[in-house]
Image (cartoon, helix red, strand yellow):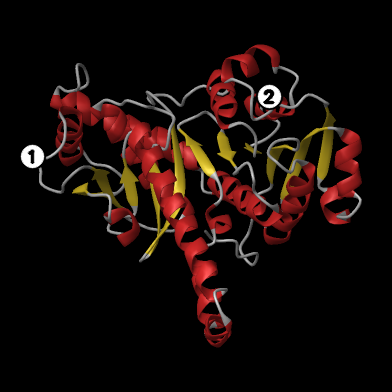
Amino acid sequence: MSTDTSLPMKKITIALDAMGGDHGVESVIPGAAMALKDYPTLEFLLFGNEIAIMRQLEKFPTLKKASRIHHTTHAISSADKPSDALRKGKDSSMRLAIDAVADGRAHSIVSSGNTGALMAMAKLVLKTLPGIQRPAIASIVPSAKGRSVMLDLGANISCDSENLAQFAILGSIFARAVMDIDRPTVGLLNVGSEQMKGNDVLRAADGLLRSVSIPGEYKGFIEGDDITKGTVDVIVTDGFTGNIALKTAEGVGHFFKNIITEEFKRNYFSMVGYLINKRVFSRIKNRMDPREYNGGLFLGLKGICVKSHGGADSYAFSRAVLVAANMVEQGFNDDVVREIEGFAEAEASLGIAEGVA
C-alpha cells in the first residue's frame, strides 16, 4: 500500500466510529492522527461522545483542525446482536458514521466495533453495488512471499459458484488497487489442487472462472498450506471455511509465540541465546505483526467500509484508516462496477447467468 506523500493526494473524508472497539477514543483518535501524518489531505468526521473525543483531540492539534465532531453517547457493544443493533442503534456512533457515507458526507467508514452489527448496518444502509449478489469480508494475510488477500471470512456461510467468482473479482481489484499488484493471481481454496476435487459448487466455480475474464490470473484450486506459502495473491473461499482458516492461522501464530517466549525464559542460557539473536527475532516479529494487516474490508457495498480489529491499538487503527483512504484514492468501487458488468456480459454469452450451482 502506497503512502508516499510526495504523490498528489485526493482530499478524502473518513467517518470514524470513535466509540467502537475495546479502547474507543483512546485508540481511534491517536490512530487517526498517525494516519493523517502519512496522508495529510485526510479529513475526519468523528462520531461519539464529544467530551471524550475533545479530551483526546487536544493532544493532536493538526488532527483537531482536520476533524468535525458529531456527538452521540450511544455505542454498539460487542455483546449486541446484529438484529438488536439494527433495531435500537439508529443514533449509535456506528450507525451515524455509516449514514455519513450513505448521504455523501464521507467517502468511507472505519470502525473497531461489533463485526456482525457493522455488516448488518452497512448492508442495510449502504446496500450492494450494482451486479453484486453478496458482499464479502476480506483481509490481508502475511505469507512467505509477502502478503495475500483472502475472502470471504465470515459474511456468507454458504455460497454458490457465482458468489465465489464475484469474490475472485473483488479480491483481484483490491490486490491491484491497494497491494499494487498489476495482475494478481487467484486461487480457489479446496481440499486438493486437482480439478476433480471438491464439491459441486467449487467445481462449478472453477469452470466459471476458467471461462470468463477477470482482472486477475486464475490459477485453479489451492490447498490450505498454500495460504502461508503465498502461492497466489488472492485466496477465494466461502465465509465458513475462510473464517475457520483465518482463526486457525491466528491461533497457531499465538501458540508459537507463547512457546518461543516460554523457552527463552526457561533459564539463563536461553535468555543469553535470545539476546544474541534479538535482532533476528525483532525482524520476525515485525513481519508477523498483526497490526500491519489490520482492517477487514467489506467489499461489494456502495461505500468503503473497513472493520478494524476490536482490540486494535492506535497504530493498528491507523493502518485500517490508510487502507480505507487507499481504496477511495484508487477508485475501488468504480473498478468493481465496471468489472462486474463485464463479468455479467460474459456469463450471459455463455448461457450460465441463471441456475448456477
Asked if the residue under mark 1 is in contact with the one under mark 2, i.e. CB atoms within 8 Å, the reply is no
**Marks 2, 1: nearer the viewer:** 1
Amino acid type at image mark 1:
Met
Q: Secondary structure at mark 1?
A: loop
- Image-quadrant location for residue 226: bottom left
Query: What number is the disc on residue 278?
Result: none
List the residue tagged with mark 1.
Answer: 196
Residue 42 in percent (x, y) is at 71, 49
Residue at image x 28%, y 34%? 165
Q: Is residue 271 above or below residue 314?
A: below
Mark 2 and mark 1: Cα distance apart in space: 45 Å
Q: Is residue 181 left or right of residue 277?
A: left
List the residue tagged with mark 2.
Answer: 95
The quadrant of the picture occupied by the C terminus is top left
Residue 109 in percent (x, y) is at 64, 36
- Image-quadrant location for residue 353: top left
Residue at image x 30%, y 26%? 159
Out of 288 and 49, give the one closest to the viewer: 288
Q: Is residue 105 above or below residue 353?
A: below
Question: Can residue 156 be seen in the rendering of this structure?
Answer: yes
Amino acid type at image mark 2:
Arg
Out of 44 and 75, give the one closest to the viewer: 75
Residue placed farthest to the front in the image? 267
Q: Secondary structure at mark 2?
A: helix
Residue placed farthest to the top in the image? 87
Question: Can residue 342 be seen in the rendering of this structure?
Answer: no
Number of residues whose C-alpha sits closer than 10 Å to that of mark 2, classed few (under 14), some (14–19) or many (20 or more): many
* Label 2 vs 1, first from the N-terminus: 2
Residue at image x 52%, y 61%? 258
Q: Is residue 2 above or below residue 32?
A: below
Residue at image x 65%, y 11%? 87
Residue 25 in percent (x, y) is at 79, 43
